[in-house]
Image (cartoon, coloured by chain):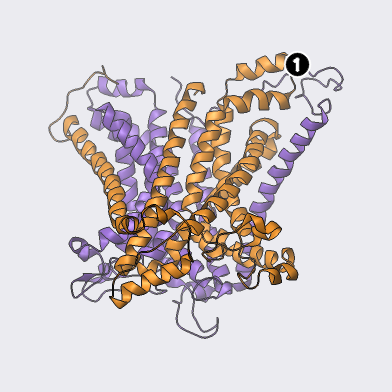
Amino acid sequence: MQEEFTPEYGPKWSDQRVERMLGALVCTLVGLLLALIVTVFIRGWPSFVHNGLAWFGSGGNVDDQLNAIFLSGQSGAEYIYTFHAWPLIWSTMLITGGAVLISLFSALFVAVFIVEFAPEWMSNILQPVVRFLASVPSVIYGLLGVLVLVPFIGNHLISEEQKASVAGIISLTGYSLIAGVVVLAMMIAPLMVSIFTDGLRSVKPGWLEGSLALGVNRWRTTWKIGVRAARPAIVAGTVLATARAIGEAVMLAMLSGSVGFAPNPADGVIFIFEPSRPLAPTIVKNIDQLSSPPGNATLFSIATVLLFSATIFSLCGHLARRSMRKYGTA
Amino acid sequence: MERTVTIPPVPKPVEPPPGSGGDKGAVEGSATWQLSDRIGLAICWGLGLLFCALAVAIVLYLLVQGVKYLRPEMLTTPASAGYTQAESGGFSDALIGTMIVAAMGIAVALPLGVATAVWLVEYGRPAGLARITESTIEAIAGIPSIVLALFGTVIFSSTALGFLSRTTEGVVFGRSFFAAGAMLSLVALPLIVASTREGLNAIPRHVREASYAVGKTKAATTRRILLPTAKPQIATGAMLGLGRIIGDTAIIVVLLGATQNFAPVEDASFPFNYLRGAGTTLTNFVYEASPTGNLNQPEKAYAAAFVLLLMVLALNAAVDIVHRRARKVGTWSS
């Protein structure tokens, strides 16, 4: 758009004035984002300073530490900041990772199905279905999880012996890792499907035709040529969905069990039934503590970690998507 | 308009390989494939049907529960304290709250988003700022809403913005419809920007040049030609944003105050006393009324969730209608 003809302008809605106004607006937006990042970071700084790298480590019971932090804020005595967030981080990693793996697998198959193999009537049904699943509010997923999935897990999948075997440490009620993972996968899979289908659709038809002409069947062609050519879209979709999953707060606050416990894979099968609480739900659950200075700092330090990880993920997705345009025909 | 141009990935008349029966011009069937490929196709079908089944199950389950528990008076009576689910009223405040929040959020996000998109597509100079803006929008889309909510508590608790929420003895409460609406507009913004840009980019250059040729300024061209042409996409973006706004819970829980009723402030005139006060929305009501919330009234949670789902379905249907109508009018041939 550099060498374009600049038409004459009137005095009031002159182009220069409009351009300057819009530019100022855009700058405000950029400034707002910077302010957000800086504010959240500064507010969380005291917690990082007091704990150092131990913030990310393990040690002690997180829930007790949070309680001590909040109590010290109310009593007005010396503020306590000691906080070792490892169980929360571990839970975030497990739930996000599990959900992303499940939904990556299923979204890839569904996207391939929609683009290549589904008969016309089927893909006409599937596309609105995917859009609908993407637009269901997270709180509805949470409600259905609490009232349908959790009782099912608690009553049918966990045996009494399993409950008894860990009774002294945690109670297995159905609010569990697996409940969070399954519902979160349902929430992010539609997002992935829509990005994957865009990517698969923009693969150059000639490449696929070339493979077909060599006698490779349609299934192999799709996977060896189509999916490989759409790799940037697959990376972008996965990464964006991961960012969404990390930030999911309300649904996981309802389903994950809300216990600052680090599920231990060494426990065997029970592992997936153990309750936990990721980072984002911790903020939602303790939002009353914003008024106490140490509580405020702790919650904002959690927010800082969320902000940085989610922003990095979504920017990576953005970059991957930009490289996708090189392959795309559009 | 990438979506309207469907490139058939496989041309229809593929010669059937020997042995597949050879019906006229049909797409190659899976009969000749190896077992592993056929299992893969079966997985495709299974997962596709699973997605459909999930959607149908969600709608039907909430429909059944909604019809069972939803009473018309729930929509008109506010929540009240009570020991049983029959005594504790309905969720009219939540319903109205959702509408207020949606209106406020979109009222901020729509002009802001369209202006940003216009700047990005039509002006976009200096190029560095354009790239930064793109990344900013992308980053805003990636920020978890709970972080936006915490940021909102910081901004709106500042004394300078005390006129937007309840203020008692100089202490600003920082939780109000204004605060929630403003932060929710950031949730909707990236969707509106993306879809407006898509619409503007789809308009070929010669349309702009024709307008310049008759002496219109760039600003006038944008206002009179480009924005009206991109209206379907702008509407789509607005409705997607609206869906995101009414579905958001974290910002509401944090920034609208933990109440189930309107809590208007005393020292303001009519619309502002409510807008400056705390309140609730359907998502917040569902969250609190679920067994893990403070109210624990699952029946009403179902009823409210059903109303919420109806809103989402209506928005989805509206997006579909706009899409279809835009496609009927046709796209530009450049």
Q: Answer with the quarter of the image where residue B63 lies.
A: bottom right
For the question of whether residue A258 can be seen, the reply is yes
Letter of the chain shown purple in the rendering: B
Q: Position of residue B3 (x, y in %)?
A: 52, 32
Q: Position of residue A159 (x, y in %)?
A: 74, 67
Q: Quadrant of the N terminus of chain A?
A: top left
Q: Residue at left 16%, top 27%?
A: A9
Task: Indicate the colour of chain A.
Answer: orange
Q: Who is closer to the viewer here, A73 or A129?
A: A73
Q: Position of residue A69 (x, y in %)?
A: 37, 69
Q: Which residue is mark 1?
A: A215
Q: Residue at left 60%, top 69%?
A: A170
Q: Position of residue A173 (x, y in %)?
A: 64, 69
Chain of the residue that carries numbered disc 1 in the rendered image: A
Q: Who is closer to the viewer here, B304 or B232?
A: B304
Q: Type of residue at label 1?
A: Gly
* Left or right, A262 with reference to A166: left
For the question of whether residue B262 can be seen, the reply is no
Q: Who is closer to the viewer here, A273 or A311?
A: A273
